[in-house]
């Protein structure tokens, strides 16, 4: 795989919208395009994102895959987890639908001397249509992004496709069932998330460990799940 630190656009906007549904994907992308410049200075970095990223790294330290040479972070935003993953994995790729988020990621990497820039690459693409071959990554992570995917089930299918046979997946998000989601929305809430274990189970993944991230302030629970491919016969 040829790695390039510059944000890349492997899919044109029109390619992505044809396959994943125009309006919702465009709305999500626009929301994050406008948030990109201030995302790094948001108070949510210390209250939410940092504790979540630390939990992801702890789980990966405790359950490393047998081979650990390539990682993919889906919905990578400004690339903090991409940088942090380089402590564990030599080559890390970040994917996001927002080009501005990826541009900020390149800046963040340049400004952080502890980040091993040479081994990271950023690609503009949707979780639902990943531009990588099957089994390309030993570790696949996604933090607080799945809640924004237009088709989480298809995104998880793609995530599992690009995972190597012995690879591990770590997903962090709200964990909530469809009925509860609908009920909360009906009551006027902005409930987001999905039943994470079920999504993974549907695509042949077993949850090996689950933690609650130590988020701070009035932030709803964020679950962090580490999963491996189910072995046949189980
Ligand atoms: C709340 S941010 C989280 C960013 C990062 N994972 C973190 O923990 O700081 C959500 C990110 O998911 C991206 N995103 C939303 N929908 C996506 C999709 N379908 N495919 C890929 N990225 C997506 C957004 O552009 C945004 O950068």
Image (cartoon, rainbow, N blue to C red):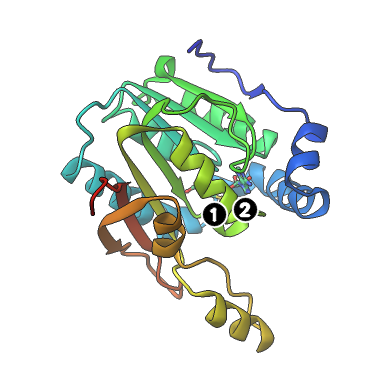
Element at label 1: helix
Which residue sits furthest front? 233
Q: Is residue 18 left or right of residue 121?
A: right
Q: Where residue 195 sits: x, y (%)?
A: 46, 67
Q: Is mark 2 within 8 Å of ligand 1?
A: yes
Q: Where residue 138 sits: x, y (%)?
A: 33, 31
For image coordinates 53% across by 66% down, the residue present is 193
Q: Where residue 33 sits: x, y (%)?
A: 72, 43
Q: Is residue 85 left or right of residue 124?
A: left
Q: Is residue 224 left or right of residue 64?
A: right
- For mark 1, does the 10 Å Cα neighbourhood hold few (<14), some (14 to 19), or many (20 or more) residues? many
Disc 1 to disc 2, C-alpha distance? 5 Å
- For mark 2, does the 10 Å Cα neighbourhood hold few (<14), some (14 to 19), or many (20 or more) residues? many
Relative height, residue 86 to residue 173 (above, below): above
Residue placed under numbered mark 1 in the picture: 146
For image coordinates 48% across by 41% down, the residue present is 159
Which residue sits furthest left? 62
The reply to whether discs 1 and 2 touch (Cβ–Cβ < 8 Å) is yes
Which residue sits furthest top? 2
Residue placed under numbered mark 2 in the picture: 149
Which residue sits furthest bottom? 187
- The residue closer to the viewer here, 10 or 143, is 10
For image coordinates 24% across by 26% down, the residue present is 67
Relative height, residue 65 to residue 24 (above, below): above
Element at label 2: loop
């Amino acid at each position: 795989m040829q790695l390039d630190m510059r944000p890349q656009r492997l899919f044109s906007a029109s390619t992505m919208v044809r396959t994943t549904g125009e309006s919702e994907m465009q709305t999500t992308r626009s929301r994050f395009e406008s948030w990109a410049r201030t995302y790094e200075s948001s108070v949510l970095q210390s209250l939410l994102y940092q504790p979540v990223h630390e939990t992801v790294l702890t789980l990966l330290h405790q359950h490393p895959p047998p081979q650990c040479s390539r990682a993919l972070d889906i919905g990578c935003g400004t690339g903090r987890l991409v940088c942090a993953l380089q402590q564990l994995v030599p080559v890390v790729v970040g994917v996001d639908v927002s080009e501005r988020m990826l541009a900020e990621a390149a800046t963040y990497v340049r400004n952080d001397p502890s980040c091993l820039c040479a081994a990271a690459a950023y690609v503009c693409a949707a979780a639902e249509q990943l531009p990588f071959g099957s089994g390309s990554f030993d570790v696949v992570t996604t933090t607080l992004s799945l809640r924004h995917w237009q088709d989480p089930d298809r995104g998880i299918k793609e995530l599992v496709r690009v995972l190597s046979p012995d690879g591990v997946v770590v997903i962090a998000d709200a964990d909530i069932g469809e009925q509860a989601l609908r009920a909360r929305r009906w009551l006027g809430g902005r409930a987001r998330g999905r039943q994470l274990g079920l999504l993974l189970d549907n695509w042949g993944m077993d949850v090996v460990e689950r933690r609650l991230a130590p988020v701070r302030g009035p932030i709803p629970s964020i679950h962090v799940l580490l999963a491996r491919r189910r072995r046949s016969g189980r």
